[in-house]
Image (cartoon, rainbow, N blue to C red):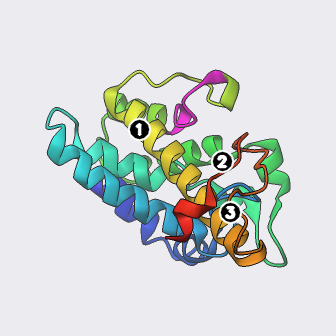
Amino acid sequence: IRGLLESVLKDKDIAPLLMRAPAAKSIHHAYLGGLLEHIVSIVDVMETLVEHYSFLNRDLLVFGAIFHDIGKISELGFESGIHYTDRGRLVGHMAIACEMIDTAAAKISSFPAPLKDILKHIVLSHHGKIEYGSPKLPMLPEALVVAMIDDLDSKLNTVSHFLQNEVENLPTDEKWSRYHPGLERYFYLEYFRK
């Protein structure tokens, strides 16, 4: 797993994109460098979780944190604004990440095929549910954790930016945020201001 990750992360074409790519077009970490921020945040959480839940495989969790959205370096264009590329619309970030796994694994002598399938499964199931765009439900504890922490990190980033914007743009006596359609709720600003 380390060899596969290093092969991808040190690639001269991939590394600069990873440093600048957003994690999404509009929902969460939707700004330059957002993907790397999202990855680092999730890796930090995984390190804490594996200490508490010792049955989890740290290598799979860290892999999932790094690789679950890595295909977004090709799915999203970010030269002038953030937009979906043709490849992104036609293939999608999960399939792109699986292609990257295949390419990197092929460079490693005797990379175990079952392990490659497990790594792909973590990527393919990271949206957590079929209706959220995952072609597979998470069927490993680590895949479930990657899906849950990805969702948590993306939602907390969304909430943080939304509340900061609300505090900066609403009158100071306003106790409640405007309605957030993506999160389907109002937020209590009094608590956030403290």
Mark 2–mark 1 distance (CA, rounded to whole Å) = 15 Å
Residue 154, placed above or below residue 138: below
Instruction: Say the numbered circle drawn on residue 162.
Output: 3
Residue in view at x 66 percent, y 48 percent: 93
Q: Position of residue 75 (x, y in %)?
A: 72, 55
First in sequence, mark 3 or 1: give its number: 1
Mark 3–mark 1 distance (CA, rounded to whole Å) = 33 Å
Mark 3–mark 2 distance (CA, rounded to whole Å) = 25 Å
First in sequence, mark 3 or 2: give its number: 2
Res 98 seen here: yes
User: Circle 3: is it few (<14), some (14-19), or many (20+) Cα within 10 Å?
Assistant: some
Kindly check if marks 3 and 1 are in contact, taking CB atoms under 8 A apart as contact.
no
Range of residues picked out in magenta:
123-130
Q: Is residue 38 left or right of residue 79?
A: left
SS for callout 2: helix
Query: Which amino acid does the dot numbered 1 rest on?
Result: Leu
Q: Is residue 36 left or right of residue 89?
A: left
Depth check: give the residue in front, 55 or 3: 55
In front: mark 3 or mark 1? Answer: 3
Residue 172, placed above or below residue 183: below
Residue hosting label 2: 93
Q: Is residue 129 magenta?
A: yes
